[in-house]
Image: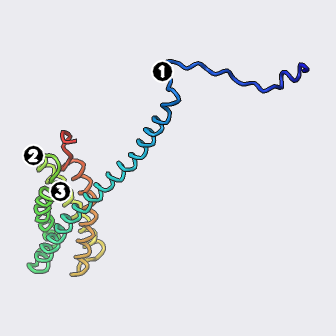
Amino acid sequence: MSPSTLHEAPQTAPPSPRSPGSAAPDTAPASASASASASASAPRLTVARLRRLFLELVKFGVVGGSGVAVNLVVFNLLLHGLSSGPMTATVVASCVAMGTNYLGFRFFAYRDRASRTKRQIALFFAFSGIGVAMESLLFYGAYHGAGMSGPLGSNVAKALSIVLASAFRFLVYRTWVFQHDARSH
């Protein structure tokens, strides 16, 4: 053999000694299956969270839908039946709906949430008051600014203002008012 062929011979690295903390080859499949199991449970957790959020949205929609019905009936009764002013009708109707919504959220949509406290009630009505103000401003803009003042137009303006203010309400009710009780999780 020439000296050049000695250098061309394939060289294999010597096996490295195992450190005391390294895994033995027979435990690799177990750790791989544990890893696969962990990654498989992660999507289930996400699906479960999405399902809970979906059910929460459905319950919020049921209570909110009944609140919208109360809001529109009282609004039309005051504005078109009793000839109240449009802003008086929208504010009073929103406040009546706020009361019925509290009962629906407390006993149906968020009955599994933290215990009912004075703080929770105060937060509900404070955030609902902000929602009423938002709804009233939106209604005012549509009724007076966009000329939606007839019977159909006023109801469309009222419905749009309710929908837009409801997005705010959903976020604050679930985040600050009807929080999960940390002790139960």
The mark that comes first in sequence, 2 or 1, is 1
Please tell me whether mark 2 or mark 1 is closer to you in this view. 1
Secondary structure at numbered mark 1? loop
Disc 2 marks which amino acid? Answer: Thr
The span from disc 3 to disc 1 (Cα, nearest Å) is 59 Å
User: Residue 59 placed where, x, y %?
Assistant: 22, 61
| Extreme residue in the front direction | 26
* Residue linked to disc 3: 128
Q: Residues within 10 Å of mark 3 (few under 14, many from 20)?
A: many
Of residues 87 and 77, which is closer to you in this image? 77
The mark that comes first in sequence, 3 or 1, is 1
Q: How crowded is mark 2: few (under 14 residues within 10 Å), some or many (20 or more)?
A: few
Vertical position of residue 115 compared to residue 71: above or below = above
Coloring applied to the structure? rainbow
Which quadrant does the C terminus fall into?
A: top left
Of residues 88 and 110, which is closer to you in this image? 110
* Residue linked to disc 1: 21
Vertical position of residue 83 compared to residue 32: above or below = below
